[in-house]
Amino acid sequence: MRASVAIFLSSPLKLLIEDDCRIDRGVRLLSGNTASLILKKGVRIGLYSVFNGGDSITVGRKSLVSGFVYLQTSMHNYMGKGSIQSQGYAHKPIVLGDDVWIGTHAVLFPGVILGDGCIVGSGSVVNKSFKAFTVVVGSPAKLLKSREF
Amino acid sequence: MRASVAIFLSSPLKLLIEDDCRIDRGVRLLSGNTASLILKKGVRIGLYSVFNGGDSITVGRKSLVSGFVYLQTSMHNYMGKGSIQSQGYAHKPIVLGDDVWIGTHAVLFPGVILGDGCIVGSGSVVNKSFKAFTVVVGSPAKLLKSREF
Amino acid sequence: MRASVAIFLSSPLKLLIEDDCRIDRGVRLLSGNTASLILKKGVRIGLYSVFNGGDSITVGRKSLVSGFVYLQTSMHNYMGKGSIQSQGYAHKPIVLGDDVWIGTHAVLFPGVILGDGCIVGSGSVVNKSFKAFTVVVGSPAKLLKSREF
């Protein structure tokens, strides 16, 4: 883990980083409320990526998160004409399976669940869940193909 | 304001940050030429966002700018076959109304004016102006819906 | 070159930065394996951009690379159901001609060759090569227009 990684926790019991994880420069891991943040064995996180954990985030074994990736487990509510700031957040957990690969600049929304071996293209905005061994791209992300074996 | 925020001004009179603003890690606020940079009361700016002020930028009250957002008030000219670097810039101000919310990784072009309560989706590239209380997404950004009340 | 620029080389002979180059805050220049990294005279690189050189990167004279740009010369292989991490990389060089302009948040894939004077729009994902004096945008990047003279 590089020196400039920033970790913000509302409780130290909420973070689990298993062995052989590598976290690059400038990454922010944030876990608020009652959320937990779990990085399983062998996870890699690229430079400046943000795990914004107003809700829980789980990243499966050997998953690869590139640089400038933004995992967003909470979103502002925006009902009515009142200030968005005063409306609080809607939040849902994000779960990445094992061996998932997230390309650079991708953004994941609250509630996204990606199955094992799922690949997200660079710059994608992922606002729904996808099954194992799929390749998804675009904004909003759509199925490009299933991985073949 | 966090320690790594970088502010570059060609004159100290050109920056106005009202009270209750929060500016996160690695943000760059730049105001060149005769431009001014105004952040009204209660503005939030997320990590690593860039306010590239070759022209003026105004952000209205309680507006929310997420991380990795790039406000670009100037663009290189690219006429003829001569070097782009030697052609100078075209610049126009950017104006965000009150209670605007800009999603992560969004880019705003020179001259963009967003009305009060406007929401820009993550990863959008905004090259024109939008009315109050609209939600816009994509590259280039298009109207997704009007906020309902 | 600003203080926070990070340069990682597997051999010091592989980096050539000609005169009058400017490299902004937080940039990462990485050259691994037998790759070389060449920045010709007058190149500008914006803040936090990443030159991920598992293969060679050449940037022509006076080319402009904006902030948060990611040049990706290698990609994980993802054959079969085995771990992506264990499959190594496919890599190809990236070559930018003279006077190229890459917009903020753009991502370039391995093997991309851009001719002189080519312009890549903000947030584009470029997965193929384009000819000189073209303007390309989108994900994946497509021809928007040819520059007129």
Image (tube, coloured by chain):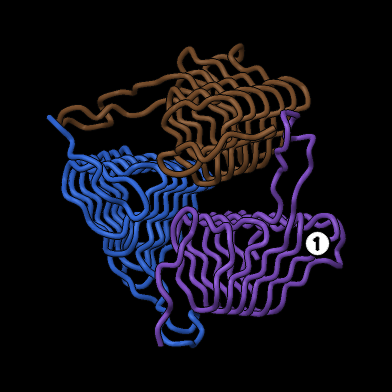
Chain colours: A blue, B purple, C brown
**In percent of the image, x 69 and y 72: which residue is there?**
B39
Horizontal and vertical percent position of residue C115: 57, 23
- The residue sitting at the front extreme is C149
Instruction: Please say if A111 is above or below C113.
Output: below
Where disc 1 sits, the SS reads loop
Instruction: Please say if C126 is above or below B119.
Output: above
Quadrant location, the N terminus of chain A = top left
Horizontal and vertical percent position of residue B7: 74, 57
Letter of the chain that mark 1 sits on in the rendering: B
Specify whether B104 is left or right of C40: left
Q: Read off the residue under disc 1.
A: B35
Horizontal and vertical percent position of residue B109: 62, 56
- Structural crowding at the residue carrying mark 1, measured as other residues with C-alpha within 10 Å and reported as few (<14), some (14–19) or many (≥20): many
Query: Can residue B4 be spotted in the picture?
Result: no
Specify whether A116 is left or right of B31: left
The amino acid on which the numbered mark 1 sits, given as a three-letter code, is: Ala
**In percent of the image, x 32 and y 45: which residue is there?**
A137
**In percent of the image, x 65 and y 71: which residue is there?**
B59
Specify whether C113 is left or right of B74: left
